Amino acid sequence: MKTGIFGGAFNPVHSGHIRLAQNYLDYLKLDRVIFIPTSVAPHKSSDEFASNEDRLNMLFLATENKSSFEISDIEFKREGKSYTFDTLCELKKLYPDDELCLIMGSDQFLFFNNWYKAQEIAQMATICTASRNDEDYEKLLEFKKENSYLKNAVICDFEVFEISSSKIRKMMKDGENIGQFVPKSVEKYIKEKKLYV
């Protein structure tokens, strides 16, 4: 089975995440995409996070009609910071016969040399990213060429939906309508739970 691994804070999950996962599913001919919300991101303060339960619930709502999308709470069950290397080690044990494709944003790809055990990660999974524009695409190609351990990385050129979770959180604080950026079920959940206000 060919499995896409899509990690992130998903704080909250938005329509850009869902569209991106679908694009990767189609482009890479994946059998499934597993969304893995981060417990404690190494580069982020956890006090800006909605609870693990709320982020999981929003992911389940956003993907409930997508049979090829799955959610894993694997990082919530581990103590300490969430490192992708540790998560991939666990996934390799759970799905020993799967070909893993690790999905990441172009900004993270260009920062990949600073990741914990980056070269080992690249051996365990095919690194996949997507450019935001033509200039971005050239930068990604150049970075791939400069780092031989990324020779198998896949740089996709489908359109990226420009919205961020931080912008959605700010819109909620400012009392703005987020309906065009998140699935309706997620918008309803955020309002009922009074998240990000």
Image (cartoon, helix red, strand yellow):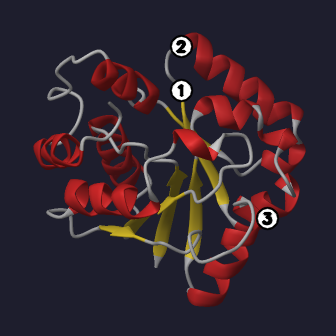
Position of the C terminus, as image quadrant, is top left
Q: Which residue is mark 2?
A: 134
Which three-letter amino acid code belongs to the residue tagged 1?
Ser
Question: Residue 157 at x, y = what percent?
Answer: 47, 30
In the rendered image, the vertical position of residue 69 relative to residue 55, given as above or below? below
128 relative position to 111: left or right: left
Q: Is 133 situated above or below 28? A: above
Question: In the depicted view, which residue is nearer to us: 24 or 176?
Answer: 176
Residue 176 is marked as none
Q: Residue shown at 50%/45% (left/top)?
A: 49
Q: Position of residue 141 (x, y in %)?
A: 70, 28
Question: Residue 85 appears at what percent x and percent y?
Answer: 76, 65
The answer to whether residue 163 is visible is: no
Query: What is the spatial separation of the Cα atoms under label 3 and label 1, in whole angstroms?
Result: 22 Å
Using the image, tell me which numbered label, if any, was put on residue 131.
1
Q: Is residue 57 left or right of residue 114?
A: left
Is 189 in front, or is 182? Answer: 189
Q: Is residue 140 above or below residue 96?
A: above
Q: Quick one: which residue is furthest to the top in this view?
A: 135
For mark 2, does the 10 Å Cα neighbourhood hold few (<14), some (14 to 19), or many (20 or more) residues?
few
Give the secondary structure at mark 3: helix
**Residues tagged 1 and 2 counted as in contact (Cβ below 8 A):** yes
